[in-house]
Image (cartoon, rainbow, N blue to C red):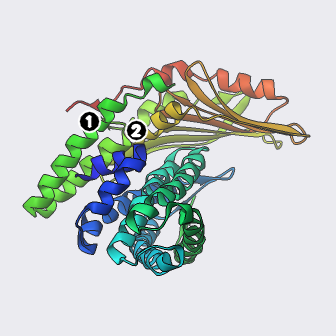
Amino acid sequence: MNLVERVQNILATPKTEWPVIAAESATVADLYKGYIAILVAISVVAGFIKGSLIGYSFGITIRMSIVGGLTQAIILYVLGLAAVYVMAHIIDALAPAFGGEKNLIQALKAAAYAYTALWIGGIGVIVPWIGWLIALAGGIYSIYLLYLGLPATMKCPPEKAGGYTAISVICAIVLSWIVAGVGAGIGANMTMGGSATSFDQDTWLGKMEAAGKRLEAAQKSGDPEAIADATRDMMSVTLGGGDKVEALAPEVLKPFVPETLAGLKRTDFSTERKGVMGMQISEANATYSDGAGRTLRLDISDMGSVKGLAKILDWANVVTDKEGDHGYEKTYKKDGRLIHEKWDSQSKEGELGMILGERFSVKLSGKAGSVDEFKATVASLNLAGLEALKNHGIKKD
């Protein structure tokens, strides 16, 4: 079974897939080369894209330098590979206590395939302002996968799988803290710089399967260049929702950032297109100010080669609604757009973000007289014009 089929089956039909996995003949090398190494790499690359290319916004956007990001990614990749093996030893050691049978290969299967949802969910960090929900969902689903998988792989009684899973998960959390701590410690030393109908699952999975077969053929050929090309192709198709996408050129994004906004003059502006491993993301950022303390920040991003993540959000129909004494925060869908609102009535500060055409992210943050004024400012942007470019740069096979 190829990698794409296995990911699809373990996520969609785990109850029937675990017995198949348990019965397969495999070695540690087989599991690493054919599965673990690839999925860990995809998750780590997503973290690099977020940290060094997109950045984290806290009023200002903070990014790790490319060199620092690559260094951290390499170390996190090695630590990630090691963490799976350590987790397998933990699962193996705990087996007798829960009526299971010690078997390191089966324990490695349990760890690797249960981690699948966590690794795939980790790609969500790329999605602006809501990616953490995808990552969280992946982590929760991984716990469920482990619960289903332990009876099949470690032969523990089903009634003891809950306790076995709980202890294993606690160990996994501690292990993740260690990995994150080491990675963060390294990163701290680096230079910092400023609806479901649209989710065409069959087409997406079909293109992923075709890309997976090309990757398998390249691996069999032993040609490093062919393997690299096939890996980039696999990641592009997977993250692009089945499409290979060239992100908008900076000059195309520029007209969507007006010189004045809500009566404020644009005081800072930048636009750029960034890429890694054949994937591209473009963004335009601007700050508006009246020189007397009132400031707005506009961020427009073309998710380009990773627009498939926006499709997942649309398909999942993510909804949140939280309200307090002095404001609210909610996520909802309106007119085919996923929208996130946040407003503080005391400070008169807010944030309004949306995803257009399952590809573009637009976010406005800052101060306004009222939430309605804030919404009107966003509505004054040429959102329809940007949304109309959703198919721009899509490459046909």
Residue 278 visible in the displayed image: no
Q: How many residues crowd around disc 1 within 10 Å: few (fewer than 14), some, or many (20 or more)?
A: few
Q: Secondary structure at mark 2?
A: helix
Residue at image location 48% in from the left, 79% down from the top: 96
State the residue in front, 207 or 223: 207
Q: Which callout, 2 or 1, points at the residue further toward the start of the chain?
A: 1
Query: Identity of the amino acid at label 1?
Result: Gly
Residue 310, placed above or below residue 228: above
Q: Secondary structure at mark 1?
A: helix
Foreground mark, 2 or 1, reads: 1
Residue 317, placed above or below residue 376: below
State the residue in front, 12 or 23: 23
In this rendering, position of residue 326 left or right of residue 205: right
Query: Identity of the amino acid at label 2?
Result: Gly
Residue 210 visible in the displayed image: yes
Q: How many residues crowd around disc 2 within 10 Å: few (fewer than 14), some, or many (20 or more)?
A: many
Which quarter of the picture shows residue 219?
bottom left
In this rendering, position of residue 228 left or right of residue 75: left
Q: Which residue is mark 2?
A: 304
In this rendering, position of residue 365 left or right of residue 324: left
Q: Which residue is mark 1?
A: 206
> Residue lying furthest left in this view?
221
